[in-house]
Amino acid sequence: MIVWSLLPWAGEGTGYGIGWRIVLDDEGNRWIGHGGGSIGGTTQLWLFPDTGLIIAMASNLTELDYEDVLPKLRTLFDRNQGHGRKAK
């Protein structure tokens, strides 16, 4: 699995790797995902390799803002499955 962001010559990570977004949130959770859309639909697929959680979402709306929904779903699943950030 490709889980590293692109490193341009300047050496700073871009947070983007071969079409996949790679994010480390404020709580230290690693998110790897991709979304897309067109007229009549949008999709999101996010992987959380540290907990094994995968969230896939599809909508029949041309413009749907997943920004608020995804973190809430992740928190809900983490609480119900005993997942959470692994201790160091």
Image (cartoon, grey):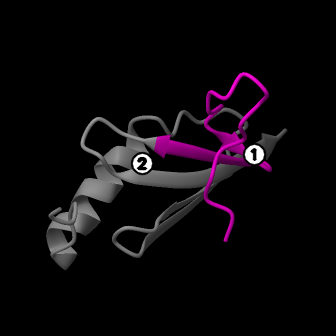
Check disc 2 and give the amino acid type.
Answer: Leu
Which residue is located at x 37 percent, y 67 percent?
50
The quadrant of the picture occupied by the C terminus is: bottom left
* Magenta region, residue range: 1-23
- Measured as percent of width and height from the top left, residue 7 is found at 71, 37
Outermost residue to the right: 39
Q: Secondary structure at mark 1?
A: strand
Image check: 78 left or right of 70? left
Nearer to me, 54 or 14: 14
Which residue is located at x 77 percent, y 30 percent?
8
Q: Is residue 34 above or below residue 3?
A: above
Q: Which residue is mark 2?
A: 70
Q: CA distance from mark 2 to mark 1?
A: 15 Å
Badge 1, how many Cα within 10 Å: few under 14, some, many 20+? few
Count all numbered tags in the image, as a single digit: 2
Label annotation for residue 71:
none
* Quadrant in the rendering for residue 82: bottom left
